[in-house]
Image (cartoon, rainbow, N blue to C red):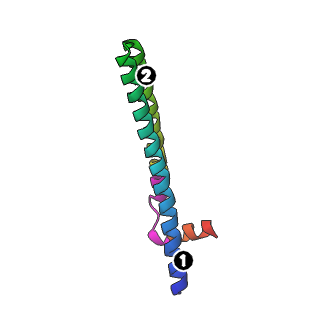
Amino acid sequence: MNILTSEMVSRVTLDTSHAQGALRDLQRESTATTREWKSMSSQLSAAGDQAGAASARMNGLGNTIANQKQKLRFCNKGCKALIGKPRLELLYITICKRS
């Protein structure tokens, strides 16, 4: 019984770490996009291209918003899967998926 419990706990932990990794990747992508458009905007502004700087800023903000929406969809999908299920059922589902 102790071995089974340890295995269940380790598998649940692995599932959680996978979700955390996916969220971290989405956050990194969003941060990289934000840095990219800020850099592009400042370079164009320094070169005197105000219209290009504004365009880069708007396109960058659009990409950042799209990345954040993707992150929210990922979180909502995960939350909807967990709503209303007892803890033991979640553990059982996790074990069955891994087997």
**Can the viewer see residue 24?**
yes
| Stretch of the chain drawn in magenta | 78-89
The amino acid on which the numbered mark 1 sits, given as a three-letter code, is: Glu
Residue 20: image location, x then y, percent = 46, 56
Q: Which residue is mark 1?
A: 7
Image position of 18 with respect to 94: above or below: above
x 61%, y 65%: residue:
97
Q: Could you say which disc has been placed on residue 56 in the image?
A: 2
For the residue labelled by badge 2, is the local secondary structure a helix, a strand or a loop? helix
For the residue labelled by badge 1, is the local secondary structure a helix, a strand or a loop? helix
Residue 21: image location, x then y, percent = 48, 55
Mark before the other along the chain sequence, 2 or 1:
1
x 39%, y 12%: residue:
51
x 50%, y 79%: residue:
6
**Can the viewer see residue 65?**
no
Residue 31: image location, x then y, percent = 41, 40
What secondary structure predominates along the stretch shown in magenta?
Answer: helix
Q: Is residue 46 left or right of residue 7?
A: left
Between 90 and 36, the one lying in front of the other is 36
